[in-house]
Image (cartoon, rainbow, N blue to C red):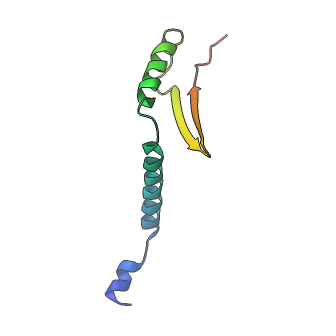
Amino acid sequence: MGLLDFFRTTSPSANLAKERLRIIVQQERGSRGAPDYLPTLRRELLEVIRKYVNVDSEAVQVNYEREEGQEVLELSVALPVKAR
């Protein structure tokens, strides 16, 4: 085993780091095509919803996807459960 072989071996932590980096790069590539108005839309929707229901700041999720020539804007609001 030569010195260069020592550096070529990959440890489980190296594989984990590589997988995490791949996920981050994939998310960055996906967000590049997203419209610039999404953070503003999310903030404004949260303000409107808070007029009627007390929700957490993470309660509103806005996702944008583009696939096969279609654009999909998905809105998810987690409302608190009202006790009876």
For image coordinates 62% across by 18% down, the residue present is 81
Q: Tell me if residue 29 comes above or below residue 54 in the rendering.
A: below
**Residue nearest the viewer, comparing 58 with 84:** 58
For image coordinates 59% across by 45% down, the residue present is 67
Q: Position of residue 44 (x, y in %)?
A: 44, 19
Figure quadrant of residue 14: bottom left
For image coordinates 45% across by 30% down, the residue present is 38
**Residue nearest the viewer, comparing 4 with 67:** 67
Figure quadrant of residue 9: bottom left
Image quarter hosting the N terminus: bottom left
Figure quadrant of residue 79: top right
Q: Position of residue 75 (x, y in %)?
A: 57, 28
In the image, farthest residue toward the left:
3
**Residue nearest the viewer, comparing 18 with 3:** 18
Residue 48 lies left or right of residue 6; in this view the side is right
The number of numbered discs placed on residues in the rendered structure image is 0
Residue 28 lies left or right of residue 61; in this view the side is left
Q: Position of residue 34 (x, y in %)?
A: 46, 39
For image coordinates 34% across by 84% down, the residue present is 4
Q: Position of residue 80 (x, y in %)?
A: 58, 19
In the image, farthest residue toward the right:
84
Q: Tell me if residue 27 comes above or below residue 11 in the rendering.
A: above
Q: Tell me if residue 41 comes above or below residue 16 in the rendering.
A: above
In the image, farthest residue toward the front:
69
Image quarter hosting the C terminus: top right
